Image (cartoon, rainbow, N blue to C red):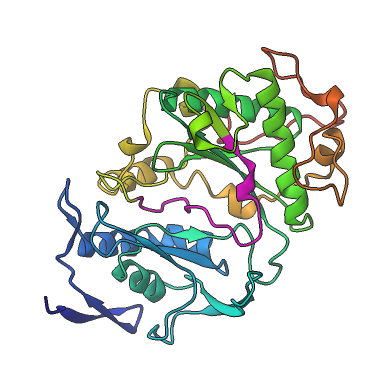
Amino acid sequence: MARKQAQIVVDGTPVTVSNLDKVLFPDDGFTKGDLINYYIRISQTLLPYLRDRPLSLRRYPDGIHGPHFWEKDAPEHKPDFVPTWPYQVEEKGRGVIHLMMANNLPTLVWIANLASIDVNPWLSRIDKPNYPDQVVFDLDPFEPATFADTLEISMLVKGVLDRLGLVGYPKTSGKTGMQIFVPIRRRFPYEQTRAFVEAVAAMIYHAYPEKITWEWAIRLRTGKIRIDYTQNVLGKTIASVYSVRARPGAPVSTPLRWEEVARGGFVPRDFKITNIFDRLQREGDLFAPVLHEPQDISEALVALGLRPGRKQGAQPPEELLPARGRVAVPRRLSRPPPSCSHCQ
């Protein structure tokens, strides 16, 4: 089939698009043109979360029910307006690849035209790549565990963060799970941020082993929730807030208020490209503090018994692990949890 190409002007830049009527979401009839239109409309809110962060593209050339593939290295045919950053890949023989970033709207449109439905950035920026400014708790349910179970565990994560004097910001993954982001100052390397998330996850696991899994093998996770701390690693990406996900209904990864998490009664597919703008108008950007309110996790690391150079995978000190059925958090912090307009 011949490609139907057109050129549109985006922020004064000509961008070539193709096959705008190609259906990417066959259950709903949403086309590539609908996807591009969504990213244009959301761009003012979304782009600050992507700026200077390398991306992984997940492309669905035949729609969400067809095969997909990942693309990190910028293709040779990329336009000049797409910014890239050279990155030395550790795998033997890979050499340097050029990671793409969505620093501008023309790039975001170009990415959507590739049928890259998800937008997946790093947790760090290119000027200090080894020092993330975001920490993420990635909660995934494994059937027959439900999204309601995931919300319950999310509240336990919040409880631990509260006691550690930190604020977390929840969002739906857009698929089946939840993600809780903690904005931090850029002075803690990935080794420490991963250890931080692992220690908190371990505390909750030891309190609720009937609901939390620590298993690596997927077949052993049945009916439980995994708090995935391994997302906090240099080079890994995770779906951005306001990213569309490749699921029926075109759901959107959506920030939440903590009272919504506590109340429940919803699932990720309730938030989608057809209603996200009404929610934004009503609620505003609930995730904005992730960009503007970094936190110091030094005292939390001390309270959890973590020190610089602690190896990944090590368990937190035994005295910090909670008794079964409750989450016991160390009481060594001198300051109370910070207030937050979105956390009541």
Locate residue 325, reporting x and y percent: 67, 12
Locate residue 209, reporting x and y percent: 63, 20
* Dominant secondary structure of the residues highlighted in magenta in the image: loop
Which residue is depicted at the point 83% across and 45% down? 298
Relative to residue 36, is residue 226 drawn left or right? Answer: right
| The N terminus lies in quadrant | bottom left
- Along the line of sight, which residue is nearer the eye, 22 or 205? 205
Quadrant hosting residue 79 = bottom left
Q: Is residue 317 above or below residue 76?
A: above
Which residue is depicted at the point 82% across and 40% down? 301
Does the magenta-highlighted stretch encompass residue 293? Answer: no
| The C terminus lies in quadrant | top right
Number of marks in the rendered image: 0
Which residue is depicted at the point 72% across and 55% down? 190
- Name, please, the residue furthest toward the left: 1
Q: Is there any visible trace of residue 64 in the rendered image?
A: yes
Which residue is depicted at the point 62% across and 38% down? 168
Q: Is residue 186 above or below residue 286?
A: below
Relative to residue 196, is residue 236 drawn left or right? Answer: left
Relative to residue 27, is residue 79 drawn left or right? Answer: right
Does the magenta-highlighted stretch encompass residue 236? Answer: yes
Quadrant hosting residue 236 = bottom right
Q: Which residues are magenta?
A: 227-245
Q: Is residue 60 above or below residue 266?
A: below
Locate residue 342, reporting x and y percent: 55, 36
- Along the line of sight, which residue is nearer the eye, 298 or 192? 192
- Name, please, the residue furthest toward the top: 325
Q: Is there any visible trace of residue 161 in the rendered image?
A: no
